Amino acid sequence: MPSQSIYREVPKPEWNWIDEDTQARILMEIPKKHRPFIYFMIRYGVRPGEARALFWEDIDFKQKVITIRRNFSLNEHRKITKTRRIRKLPLFSDIEEILKTLPRAINS
C-alpha cells in the first residue's frame, strides 16, 4: 500500500503593505543611527539578515547595482541567501546618497 504524502499545501498569506506615511512615522521612532539600515530594508524589501550581510564590495556605485548574495544568521555570515539565489537590485539615488554618508568600516 503506497503511503500518502505527509505534506499538506499551505496557502501563502496575502501581502500587507505599510503606506509611506506610516513608514515615515516608524522611521522617526527608530534611533537615528539605525534609520539608514531600516530605511534600506523598507526601500528594497530585503530580509534583515540579507541587509546585515552586505559588504561594500556588493555595492557597485558605477553600475548603480546592489548585489544580494549572502545572509547573516546565527551570528555568522552565510554564503547563500535564504532562497539560495543571488539578486541584483537597482541602486536608487536616495539610497546612494545615504550610503555615501556611512563609514566604510566599523572603527572609522
Image: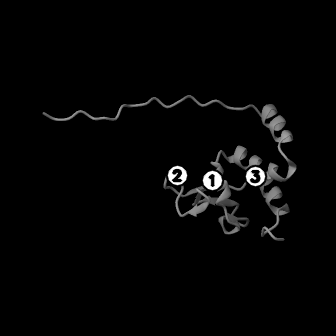
In whole angstroms, how far apart are the C-alphas of marks 1 and 3?
11 Å
> Residue 11: image x %, image y %?
46, 29
Crowding around mark 1 (Cα neighbors within 10 Å: few <14, some 14 to 19, many 20+) is some
Task: Decide which of tag 3 and tag 2 comes sooner along the chain.
Answer: 3
Residue found 60% across the figure and 62% down from its top:
76
Which quadrant of the view contains residue 45?
top right
Disc 2 designates what residue? 82
Residue found 49% across the figure and 55% down from its top:
84
Asked if disc 3 and disc 2 are in contact, CB closer than 8 Å, the reply is: no
Disc 1 designates what residue? 49
Crowding around mark 3 (Cα neighbors within 10 Å: few <14, some 14 to 19, many 20+) is some
In whole angstroms, how far apart are the C-alphas of marks 1 and 2?
9 Å
Disc 3 designates what residue? 37
Asked if disc 1 and disc 2 are in contact, CB closer than 8 Å, the reply is: yes
Q: Kindly state the secondary structure of the residue where label 1 is placed.
A: helix
Instruction: Please tell me which residue lies in front, 95 or 13.
Output: 13
Amino acid type at mark 2: Lys
Which quadrant of the view contains residue 71?
bottom right
> Residue 97: image x %, image y %?
83, 57
Residue found 79% across the figure and 32% down from its top:
22
Q: Kindly state the secondary structure of the residue where label 2 is placed.
A: loop
Crowding around mark 2 (Cα neighbors within 10 Å: few <14, some 14 to 19, many 20+) is some
In whole angstroms, how far apart are the C-alphas of marks 3 and 2?
19 Å
Above or below residue 45? Residue 71 is below
Instruction: Please tell me which residue lies in front, 93 or 11.
Output: 11
> Residue 102: image x %, image y %?
82, 62
> Residue 91: image x %, image y %?
71, 56
Q: Kindly state the secondary structure of the residue where label 3 is placed.
A: helix
Q: Which quadrant of the figure contains the C terminus? A: bottom right
Which quadrant of the view contains residue 90?
bottom right
Amino acid type at mark 3: Phe
Q: Which quadrant of the figure contains the N terminus? A: top left
